[in-house]
Amino acid sequence: MNRDKGNVLVFGGYGQLGQCLQAVVGSANERLVFLSSQQANVANEEQLVSLFNHYKPTIVVNCAAYTAVDQAEDEVEQANVLNADAPATIAKLCKQFDVEFIHISTDFVFEGNKTGLLSETDDTKPVGVYGQSKLAGEQAIEQIWEKHFIIRTSWLYAPFGNNFVKTMIRLGKERTQLNVVADQVGTPTYGIDLANVILMFISQPERAYGRYHYSNEGAASWYDFAHAIFEINQLQVKLLPISTSAFPTKAKRPAYSVLDKSKIKQQLAIEIPHWRDSLKRCLNFSQSIE
Ligand SMILES: NC(=O)C1=CN([C@@H]2O[C@H](COP(=O)(O)OP(=O)(O)OC[C@H]3O[C@@H](n4cnc5c(N)ncnc54)[C@H](OP(=O)(O)O)[C@@H]3O)[C@@H](O)[C@H]2O)C=CC1
Ligand SMILES: Cc1cn([C@H]2C[C@H](O)[C@@H](COP(=O)(O)OP(=O)(O)O[C@H]3O[C@@H](C)C(=O)[C@@H](O)[C@H]3O)O2)c(=O)[nH]c1=O
C-alpha cells in the first residue's frame, strides 16, 4: 500500500496535541482528517468501524486519551477505558483494515528511580493509575498489531488545551508567591515539535515500526520549568522550590523521567530543539494568537 496517499484519521483531533497537528499541517491539508470525541468516540467500536469503512484510512493517529493524572486515581475505570481498552480496539481495527497505527504514550510509564536517560527498552513500572493505564494501552497495541509507532513523550505543552505553562501563567497573574516542586525531573515537550515528528512518521518512506521516545532536549525540574516560564514572560513572581512531600497530590509521579531520544534522532535524522528554545517559540506563538 502506498502510505504517501490516503486518509490519515486523527482521533482526539481537538485536544492539545490534536490542535498542534492541525496548526502544523495548516490550511493546505488534504490528507489528515481531524475527528473530535463526538465524531470518533474511541470507546465506541461500532462508530470506529463505520469511520474506517467511510474514510478508508491508510494511517490512524490516536491523540485521544484520559490525561487527568490526579483524577485518574479516582476514575480508574474511565482511565482504563480510554488509555488501555480504546488503543486495543483501535489496534484490532487497524489490523483488520491493514492500517498503520501511530499512538502517543508517556514518560509516566516509568517508576522514576533511575537517574540516567530512559531508553525504549528500559523496564517500566508506573507509579500511578494514569501511567498504568497508558502502559496497558502500549502493551495491547504491541500484542495485537505490528504496524504501529508508539511515541512516548513527556510534559507536553502548547498554546492549546490545558498544560503546566498555562497553569503557571494563570497562577503567576493571580498570586505573588508560588511553590513548585524541584525534585521531579523530566523534559518539557512543545506540542508543535512533537506534531512535526508525527508528520515525519506519516510521510517517511521507510516504515520502521516500534517504540520511540521523543521530548525536547535537556532536563528540568518543574521548578526550573516554572522559572523559565516567568523569566521569558517577564512575570514578577516569587517562586519557591519545594520538595514533592510539600506539595501533596492524589497521584504519585516519577521523580526522574528524562527520555533517551537517540533512536528517534537516528531514525528520522533530526536534531531536537532544547526545551528552553521551544518554550520561547511557544510563548511567542501564544502571544501572536491571543
Ligand atoms: N499532556 C501531557 O503532558 C502529555 C500527554 N501525553 C499523551 O499525549 C497524548 C495527547 O495528549 P494531550 O493532547 O495533551 O491530551 P488532551 O487531554 O489535551 O486531549 C485528549 C483528547 O482526547 C479526547 N477524548 C476524550 N475522551 C474521548 C473519547 N471517548 N473518544 C475520543 N476522544 C476522546 C478529548 O476530547 P474532549 O475534550 O472532547 O473530551 C481530547 O480532545 C495522550 O495520549 C497523552 O497520554 C504524553 C505525555 C505528556
Ligand atoms: C500547579 C502546581 C503544580 N505543581 C507540581 C505538581 C506536579 O508534581 C507537577 C506537574 O503538575 P501538573 O499536574 O501540571 O502536571 P501533570 O498533569 O502531572 O503532567 C503530566 O501529565 C501527563 C498527562 C503526562 O503524560 C506527563 O508527561 C506529565 O506532563 O507540578 C507544583 O509544584 N506547584 C503548583 O503550583
Image (cartoon, helix red, strand yellow):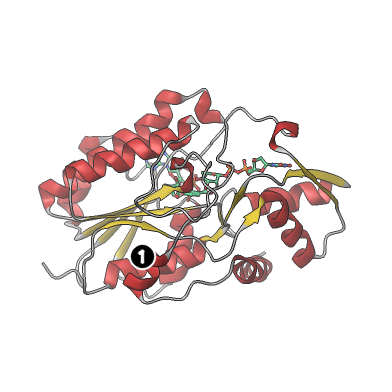
Occupied quadrant, residue 251: top right
Occupied quadrant, residue 2: bottom left
Q: Nearer the viewer, residue 31 or 180?
A: 180
Residue at 86% across, 53% down: 237
Q: How many marks?
A: 1
Q: Is residue 136 visible?
A: yes
Cβ(mark 1) to ligand 1 < 8 Å? no
Occupied quadrant, residue 278: bottom right
Type of amino acid at the residue the image marks with label 1? Lys
Q: Nearer the viewer, residue 232 or 268?
A: 268
Pinpoint residue 19: horizontal percent, then vertical percent.
Answer: 47, 58
Left or right: where does residue 274 sit relative to residue 246? left
Left or right: where does residue 279 sit relative to residue 32? right
Q: Is residue 41 visible?
A: no
Quadrant of the rendering where the N terminus is positioned:
bottom left
Q: Secondary structure at mark 1?
A: helix
Residue at 39% across, 39% down: 134
Pinpoint residue 96: horizontal percent, then vertical percent.
Answer: 11, 46
Q: In the image, ligand 2 is in what quadrant?
A: top right
